[in-house]
Each structure stands twice: as C-alpha cells, then as structure tokens.
Image: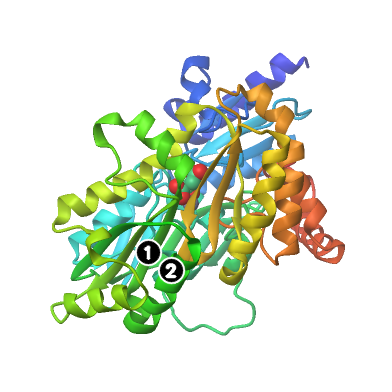
Amino acid sequence: MSSHNFTETHLAKFREICGNNNVVTKPELMSAHLTDWRKRYSGNAIAILFPENTSQIVAIIKYCQHQKVAITPQGGNTSTCGAATPLANHTAPQIIINLARMNKVIEVDRVNSSVTIEAGCTLQMVQEIAASHNLYFPLTLASQGTCQIGGNLATNAGGTQVLKYGMMRDLTLGLEVVLPNGNIMQNNHKLRKNNTYLDLKQIFIGSEGTLGIITRATLKLFPLPVNYLTFMLPVEKLVTALTLLEKLKHYYLNNVSAFEIIKDDSQKLYNQQFPDAKLPFTANWLLLAELEINADFNLDNFISLLESIGINPDDVLIASNDKQRRDLWLIREHIPLAEKAYGYAVKHDISLPLGKIEEFLATSMPKLRKIEADGYFSIFGHLGDGNLHYNFGKKGASLTDTEALEEQVSQIVYQDVINFGGSIAAEHGIGIAKKQWFKKYTPVENLELLQTLKKQLDPLNLFNPSKIL
Ligand code: MLT
Ligand code: ZN
C-alpha cells in the first residue's frame, strides 16, 4: 500500500473509534495545533483526534501501537518548550491527541476538599468550579483560560502561587493514565495519605506526554482566601527584595503567597507595548508581592516591617480594592506578552538557591553583554521560588537571528546556573527546547534510569518521540 492508502486506512479507523467530528484533517483547522504558542516549533500530523472518553483513548493507542503511529498528547498548546508540538520530519506517521473534549467535572468533594475532573478541563474551569463551592484551587498562570489540567500535570506547572501552595505535583491526589500499551493506570484516589509502596502518579507528573496520556485527576482544594494584601514597590538592589522576603516569611509564615520580580528592561518592553496601562513606577527591579490576610491583619505592623529594613512605605503601592489588585497582576501577566511582541529572545526558565541569585546575575550578565553589547535582558519571574525567566535578546531579532545567538548565550547561562547549584528547567519543562542541555547536565546514571523507564513503558518510542530524551 502507498503511504496515502495507509493514511486513509488510519483515518478510517480513527473515525470509527472517535466519530467523524472528532477527527480533524483540514489544514486550516489543524494549523494552530501544529505550532507552539511562541511559533518557535512546527510539525505535522495526519490528523488531530479529539476523543470524548478514556475508552476511545485506549482504542486509539492500541491501534497506534499495532500500526506504529506516533502520538503527541496535547492540551491547550501553551507550552513554551515545544513539548506539545509534533515533529517536523518524523519517519512514522504522527497524530495529535487533544483532550479538549474531555472536560467534565466529575465530582467536587467539599468534605475532602478535592475535585475530580477530566484532564481536558481548562485551569480556569477548575478555579471557577472550586470558587463556586467556596473553595480555592491555587495554581495561577497567565494562560489559565486556555491551558488544560492534563498539560499542567504533564509539565508539573508552577506559576505565581507556588510559594505557599507548591507546584502541580503538590496539588495532586490521584491520576488516571492510559499507558502506551493501552492499559489504564488507576491511581485516581482522593487520599492525602497512601503509602502502598511507590506513588505511581509521580512518574507521570512532569513526563511531558512521553509515558502515557493523563485522562483524569483528583486535585486538592483549599479554603478561599479571606482577603489579600497585594503590593508593588520599586527596589534598586535585589538584596532589599530578598531581605523583605525573609522578613515577610518570618512574620506572616505561610501566608506569603506570591513574590514576583520584574527587571528594568522588561519594564521598558511592557511600557512600550501597553502605553495605556503604564507601570506605576520604573526602577532597577519592580517587586509584586501578595499576602493572604484576614480580619486581624494590622497594617501598622506591616508598615513597621517595611521601615525596619529601610523601605519607605510611601514608595509602596498597596492595592486598595479588587480591581487594583487585578490590575497589578495584569501587569505581571503581560510581561511575557510584551516580550513576545518585541521579538524573539533566548529564553531560560531557571531556578537557583535564593542566596545565590545575586552572585549568579553578577557573573552571568556581563558575559552576555560581551556577546551582544546592546542586547536586552528581560528578567522576571517568581523570585520567592528562586525561579527567574532569564531572557536575553537582540532588538528586533528574527527567529533566525535568535537561533544564531541561542547556543552561545545558553551555554553561558546554563553553565553558570549549574555552577551556582541551580536548575536549567524550573517550571516550563524540557520539551524540544532544552533537550540538548538536559542531556548535557543530567548525570549519566540518572539518564540511564530515565531511559530504562521510557523503554519499558514505551518500547516502540511512539509517545512524544524525540522530546526530552
Ligand atoms: C510567567 O511566569 O509569566 C511564564 O512562566 C513565563 C513565560 O511564559 O515565558
Ligand atoms: Zn513563570
């Protein structure tokens, strides 16, 4: 049979399994799924499948195993590392399995403070369903209206509330996963304690679609915060921000929920892109932080705390209502958009021990300046978690310009990150973007263990082939 005939046979089978409407082959409907959010990676596929339940996924996977069809699992397609984009030149035929039509809320258990959902629910749906029960799901990302829980799990997503609530891994009680052999791993329990040998769900959280497809999850819910103290302030030296963080954690314990930072070049990009919603101040660093507070909160004590470390309270903008709070968060959420609109930067999603961040910056920034004297540093992120989006770009750079710069820039950044005891992938994952660096900086024994696991679960290498490993 010719490859055309093979494709037609595959499509007929997929239509039989999922129904005609759930198998998309029209190029104009496929194109958004074949490119990543940043338009950095593009691939191809014979179809995009939108299964409606786990049984359909099992049937698709069994067929793909038999016919050696490669599978890219996809949620909201908001990965910044190309993890949800099929390959451009793969030898085997490829399909995308998109979970968008598996978006049922199965149960909200108020007594247990948990929600059980299908993996195609968007993050925002989960936040809203929790709020409608007077409960809170804390994962917060700019892409929350689009990204899906399955993708959040597959990448162990982080975001702005990790300081208090942790990453997706910390927010998960149970998972259902369809394995590459078509078996269903049933681990979708609601328990906060369960020591029955290894916690199998952990293998799949952060696996970026290489070991199976997450189809259902049970997530932790929390009491809705009573109120917030959200504030922004300019700081000249990072040490001031770090001292403030230490004081806040000491005084307010686990109620410091966010501690974000924005460097001056990112502020410029933002003001340029959003002239109608300019920043209230510009400075070497802008800090945006949030405390969860209740009726006992004493503003005078907070002001004394600021003064005790030399911060003038008059320099601090405190959101006085919900709209102001939302506006401050919108600024933070729009920083990556401003950067994207400006051009391609070489992006890094790194983390470092808090005490090493200043030294890292002082070491690495001058080296990058030497490569590109008028390059810009778009640095922002989750300082409270030691997680910086450390991006370096050249004004007006095209994708090709950036690609030429990337190897040299990343070489310096990642080596310094490793030298200071950090991670080259804090919250975005590896995907295609960091594959070579992951290989370089992962001990060979660890790589062997990961490869053993991959080979055991997916011997034909059909699940998100050529990603990560
Ligand atoms: C953020 O924190 O805004 C994102 O993780 C950064 C990004 O999308 O580049
Ligand atoms: Zn981030």
The image's mark for residue 464 is: none
- Mark 2 Cα shell of 10 Å, populated few (<14), some (14-19), many (≥20): many
Residue at image point 25% right, 36% down: 277
Q: Amino acid at mark 2?
A: Leu
Residue 124 locus on image (x, y percent)? 32, 49
What secondary structure is marked by label 2? helix
Residue 162 locus on image (x, y percent)? 44, 65
Closer-to-camera residue (101/259): 259
Residue 304 seen? yes
Can you say whether 56 is above or below 36 in the image?
A: below
Q: Which residue is mark 2?
A: 163
Residue 146 locus on image (x, y percent)? 38, 41
Earlier sequence position, callout 2 versus callout 1: 2
Q: Amino acid at mark 1?
A: Ala
The image's mark for residue 258 is: 1
Disc 2 to disc 1, C-alpha distance: 6 Å
